Amino acid sequence: MNFINLIIYFAVTFLIFLFVYLFIKSKSNLSLIDQDYSKPQAFHKTPTPRIGGLAAIICLCVFFLLNYIFNEIILYDYVFVAISLFILGFLDDTKVWINPSTRLIFMIILLCFLINIFSLFIYKTGLTFLNHWIENYYFIAILFSLLCFVFIINGANLIDGFNGLLGIHFLIINSVLVYVNYTNNHADFSFFLMAQILIIISFIIFNFPKSRIFLGDGGSYLFGGLISMNVINTSKLNPEISPFFFCVILFYLFYEVFFSFCRKAFKKKSPVKPDNNHLHMLIFDKLQSLNIKNPNALTGLVINLVYFLLILPVCFNFSSAHENALFFRYWFFTLLVIYTLVYAKLYRSKKKITLLM
């Protein structure tokens, strides 16, 4: 796929998003229209179609079809992971009621199956003792890989609450992976990542700064799965790169879920029950308290700008040198500390504002 093909494919993805948007909008009584403004994670005030994921999976299937027609290549792992995760999330978008705990169980069963069938194991962790356990104990190998998938997919689902937040975040991550793979002469995989970027750009056009559509759970599960697959395959294609390089790239998605789980467990609340105390929500509250115009879109911009600046030190120096591996490791844990301190400050600020009101 050359540059001209990418331009043509971008036009196709945009038209697919436009068609799906216009079709669903004309069917105002469909369950795909989000009109529930009472949810903790709801920050919209007008009925908005949750069909970004539907348009995205159609675009992705078009790519799979074209790749088969012109290159006679079928990306079986991507096809099955993308479609199955999309369906799991789309059931919730269409009001097929599945409580969060049951949906998580379905996700775990599905991911265990996919990890085994397509050998999506993560063998390199950057930690010698963990590498040894993964190589020698099948249960540890599948448990670790499963946890990585679950954390990233649910991280994508958690941050999909503000205009452009997940879309721009996916754009940054995939752009870094394109740079890594293209620099190391993996052009074919780089073009596939570029095709995904074109899909998310088409979505962002309809989602930022004003949200005409949402990704929905189907879309957030889909892109969370794509991020996981993209990182796993980049790591396999570039085994010389330290696993902690990828930890840095994924720190926000991972730690958003991990920190949220610990925070709710500490307060003796259900880890799967949604609330309005996630980092992006606290930032939104802070911006809103400052009477800033359009705090919804600005939240996504602020978080992704800070995220990009924080991962920038590792993006242009990902060689296998020992000192780089050590830097990636220490920088990853530094980012977790930064997140925790920022969260604590914003949470205290929210409490003060609540008391004053």
Image (tube, rainbow, N blue to C red):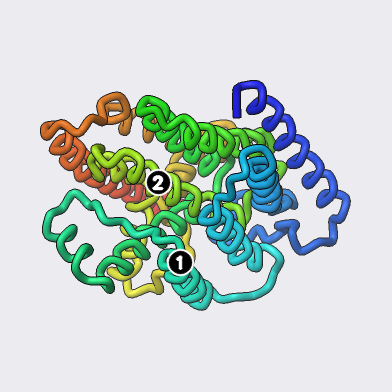
Q: Are marks 1 and 2 in contact (CB under 8 Å)?
A: no
Q: Residues within 10 Å of mark 1 (few under 14, many from 20)?
A: few
Amino acid at circle 1: Ile
Name above or below for residue 352 compared with residue 309: below
Q: Earlier in the sequence, mark 1 or mark 2?
A: 1
Residue 193, image x and y in percent?
A: 51, 37
Name above or below for residue 104 compared with residue 124: below
Determine if residue 45 is in view: no
Q: Which residue is found at the position 70% from the left and 37% from the top?
A: 13
Tell me if 129 is positioned left or right of 214 in this view: left
Q: Report the disc number at residue 233.
A: 2
Disc 1: which residue: 117
Residue 283, image x and y in percent?
A: 43, 42
Q: Which residue is found at the position 29% from the left and 45% from the top?
A: 247
Q: Report the disc number at residue 76.
A: none
Name above or below for residue 122 compared with residue 113: above
Quarter holding the N terminus is top right
Between 260 and 32, which is closer to the camera in this rendering?
A: 32
Amino acid at circle 2: Asn
Outermost right residue: 26
Label 1 to label 2: alpha-carbon separation: 16 Å
Between 192 and 350, which is closer to the camera in this rendering?
A: 192
Name above or below for residue 203 compared with residue 216: above
Q: How many marks?
A: 2
Instruction: Kindly state the secondary structure of the residue where label 2 is placed.
Output: helix
